[in-house]
Amino acid sequence: DAEVVLTAEKPELKNDSKLGYQLDVDAFKSQVEDLLENGEDNQAVALTVNTLRPCIDSSTAEGGLQLVVEWSTDTSKSSKKRLENVALALSRFNGMALYPGTTVSFNQVVGKRTVENGFNEAPEYNGTTVLTGIGGGTCQASSTLYGALLKLNLQIDKRGNHSMTVGYTKPSFDAVVSDSGRDLV
């Protein structure tokens, strides 16, 4: 598929699409079985290869992208480090294509919230208290994504809310995530 990145101005094509090729495994197995049963020594097998066309080709990606939904959460009370965590978490979804039947885990896409993975120490909720932890702000990223998914009417398989009301979105529009298993799927 063509790879597209979203910039502040517009979506931009990062990498062109290409044709793919896939061996027809069933045809190959059938030929090998036939050779084993009836074949002669040194007989050649013609491989059947299918051409795979990209779902997102370069010409569609360049000229056909359009905004389909917009959702935001309030970042006015966030520290610089927290904002960096929100931006980093959301950047991991930049250019991601979702195909019918695909299941996506926020935690798998974003990865562990560690310093090695680029996350900062920032305020985060822990039960009914606010503590400083690595990755503070990633719940705001998941909540922002959750709001957009709701507007798109996409299926939500897993989502939890915080034990306290969060200040960055309306009640019931938050989506808590954690390295210990809370996820948006």
Image: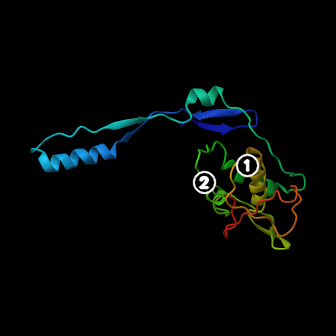
Q: Where's residue 160, x and y in %?
A: 75, 64
* Residue type at numbered disc 2: Thr
Quadrant (top left, top right, bottom left, bottom right) of the C terminus:
bottom right
Look at the image and name its color scheme: rainbow
4 left or right of 31 in image: right
Q: Quadrant of residue 174?
A: bottom right
**Which of the numbered marks, if any, corresponds to residue 110?**
none
Q: How busy is the neighbourhood of tag 2: few (under 14 within 10 Å), some, or many (20 plus)?
A: few
Give the labeled residue for mark 1: 149
Picture coordinates of residue 26 (x, y %)? 32, 46
Q: Is residue 178 left or right of residue 83?
A: left
Residue found 79% across the figure and 41% down from its top: 70
Q: Secondary structure at mark 1?
A: helix
**Residue position for label 2:** 103
Tell me the crowding category of disc 1: few under 14, some 14 to 19, or many 20 or more residues within 10 angstroms, Cα based: some
Picture residue at 29% right of the left edge, 43% below the top = 27
Q: Secondary structure at mark 2?
A: loop
- Residue 77 horizontal/vertical position (percent): 90, 56
Q: Nearer the viewer, residue 135 or 72?
A: 72
